[in-house]
Image (cartoon, rainbow, N blue to C red):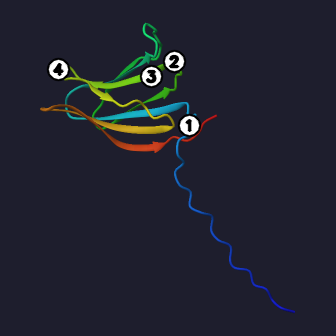
């Protein structure tokens, strides 16, 4: 009687970070401030039709080296406008949020002005 030996089972394939779903309903935007000046993270919904007003405006003070995050929900009739401000400086506008993603930005007021840059990005997963 011949003996048949099967090859050992293969380990499951490595799981890669899932891309955000096209129908993702939320985004998380965080800002990490640095420097001694008081900075503020603000956002508002801007209607796609002129004259419309929407709830959800916020203005959050930033603390140095601490992430200040806000959950933003998708809207079919409005877009998010995000900015970092400080008195005496031109506002630093952040790009529109990528729904299904958590994006962290750095913000710093220097002698040359207010500077913002993305420092981290990761998917937030699905929620039901």
For discs 4 and 3, the disc positioned in front in the rendered view: 3
Name the residue at 74% across, 80% down: 6
Q: Looking at the image, do the residues carrying marks 4 and 1 touch, with CB atoms under 8 Å apart? A: no
Give the total of numbered labels.
Answer: 4
* Residue farthest along the right direction in this orientation: 1
**Is residue 47 rendered to the left or right of residue 39?**
right
Q: Return the x and y of residue 14 as percentages of the image width and height.
A: 56, 61
Say which mark, if any, is on residue 14: none
Name the residue at 64% across, 34% down: 128
Quadrant assignment for the N terminus: bottom right
Circle 2 residue: 77
Write down the quadrant of residue 5 in the picture. Answer: bottom right
Q: Earlier in the sequence, mark 4 or mark 3?
A: 3
Asked if residue 65 is positioned above or below residue 46 in the image, the reply reads: below
Cα distance between the residues tagged 2 and 4 = 33 Å
Say which mark, if any, is on residue 22: 1
Circle 3 residue: 79
Cα distance between the residues tagged 4 and 1 = 39 Å
Name the residue at 65% across, 71% down: 10
Q: Looking at the image, do the residues carrying marks 4 and 3 touch, with CB atoms under 8 Å apart? A: no
Cα distance between the residues tagged 4 and 3 = 27 Å
């Amino acid at each position: 009687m011949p003996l048949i030996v099967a090859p050992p089972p293969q380990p499951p394939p490595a799981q890669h970070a899932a891309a955000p779903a096209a129908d993702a309903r939320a985004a998380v935007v965080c800002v990490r401030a640095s420097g001694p000046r008081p900075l503020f993270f603000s956002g508002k919904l801007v209607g796609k039709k002129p004259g419309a007003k929407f709830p959800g405006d916020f203005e959050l003070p930033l603390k140095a080296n601490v992430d200040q995050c806000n959950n933003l929900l998708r809207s079919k009739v409005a877009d998010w406008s995000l900015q970092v401000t400080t008195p005496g400086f031109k506002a630093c506008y952040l790009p529109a949020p990528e729904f299904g993603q958590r994006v962290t930005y750095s913000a710093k007021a220097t002698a040359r002005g207010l500077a913002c840059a993305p420092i981290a990005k990761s998917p937030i997963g699905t929620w039901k």
